[in-house]
Image (spheres, rainbow, N blue to C red):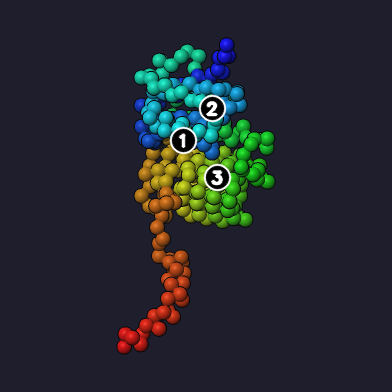
Amino acid sequence: MRPAQKTCKLVAPDWAALDTVWRNDLPFVLWPVGNQPLLAHWMDEAVRRDVELVELYVADRPAEVRAWIEDGAYWSRRVRLIPIRNEAQAPEDAERIDHFPGLKAPAIPNSATELPGYWFELQKQWLAQRSPETTTLDDQHPSGGWVGPRVEIHRTARLTAPFWIGARAHIGPGCEIGPNAIVAEGTILDGNVQVEQACVLPRTYLGRNTRLFHAAASGSVLLDFRRGCRADIAEPFIMGSVMDRSLKPGVFGRILALLCRLLFAPFVWLLLPRWR
């Protein structure tokens, strides 16, 4: 007789009604915590437990969760996603994905204004549990934090652990990172930017002399954890998406114009006699 599969039952919290501040397109279990979505940390935990089958009960946007699961076949674990109308339909023994695996959950948010701060508490939990024994592509910085591949950090930047800087991030001169700072992959911090008790999401630009404190920046969206509010920044020189930033006239524009003149001037002079 074939032995029963070792199964892990998980239920995703349905906090769609609470997400009126950030208004994220994804359910809470797919919000980033450190270097990957919260659900990915639980999938890693299933691998550590040597689980063969993960039963995932989802009420909030199960289609988005299913699409993400199907893109993560590298876990080598079977996942059975079960859509439900509400959390009460999940089995009583299902673990709730509202905290970091193995750690105690912070105080559960009771209002929309509390949800962004609760999410950042999970970020701090992820930072606190990192250790040199963790299997990761990141390197431990001499100051005690973590730095991903191909990160550029100006020699005048000051880093205070705990912090994490994701792959291909650029940290400009005079920047202050940490403590409790998440600077995700592909971000660009201009000169004299301060990120403390804060989170910069992937491919976000922060302009010169800006300060992010008890807040998160995602493109042009600013989330204030203390006030539980959102602001949309229209000025791209303050903050915005790295992909949306266009080349502005200035030093780089003048350099580009000079290069064009040097490259194409000889061809123009060759053609001048014909124009005459």
Q: Amino acid at mark 1?
A: Asp
Q: Label 3, secondary structure: give it.
A: loop
Which residue occupies 55% across, 17% down?
Answer: 5
Residue corresponding to mark 3: 166
Among all residues in the image, which is located at the extreme front? 1
Q: Nearer the viewer, mark 3 or mark 2?
A: 2
Q: Earlier in the sequence, mark 1 or mark 2?
A: 1
Q: Mark 1 = which residue?
A: 71
Residue name at image x 55 percent, y 41 percent: 181
Q: Nearer the viewer, residue 136 or 232?
A: 136
Give the vertical position of 56 relative to 140 (above or below).
Answer: above
Give neighbour class at mark 1: few <14, some 14-19, many 20+ (Cα, 10 Å): few
Mark 1 or 3, closer to the camera = 1
- Residue 110 in view: no
Residue 100 vs residue 159, the one in the foreground: 100
- Residue 199 in percent (x, y) is at 50, 41
Q: Residue at x 41, y 55 (%)?
A: 245
- Image quarter where the C terminus lies is bottom left
Horizontally, residue 149 falls left or right of residue 115, namely right
Choose the circle earlier in sequence order: 1 or 3: 1
Q: Amino acid at mark 2?
A: Arg
What's under tag 3, amino acid-wise?
A: Gly
User: Distance between the Cα atoms at labels 3 and 2?
Assistant: 27 Å
Label 2: few (<14), some (14–19) or many (≥20) C-alpha neighbours in 10 Å: some
* Disc 1 to disc 3: CB gap under 8 Å: no
> Distance of mark 1 from mark 3, alpha carbons?
21 Å
Q: Position of residue 144 (x, y in %)?
A: 66, 42
Q: Residue at x 50, y 33 (%)?
A: 73
**Residue position marked by numbered label 2 in the rendering:** 77
- Residue furthest toward the left? 276
* Front one among 38 and 275: 275
Which badge, 3 or 2, is on the more N-terminal residue? 2
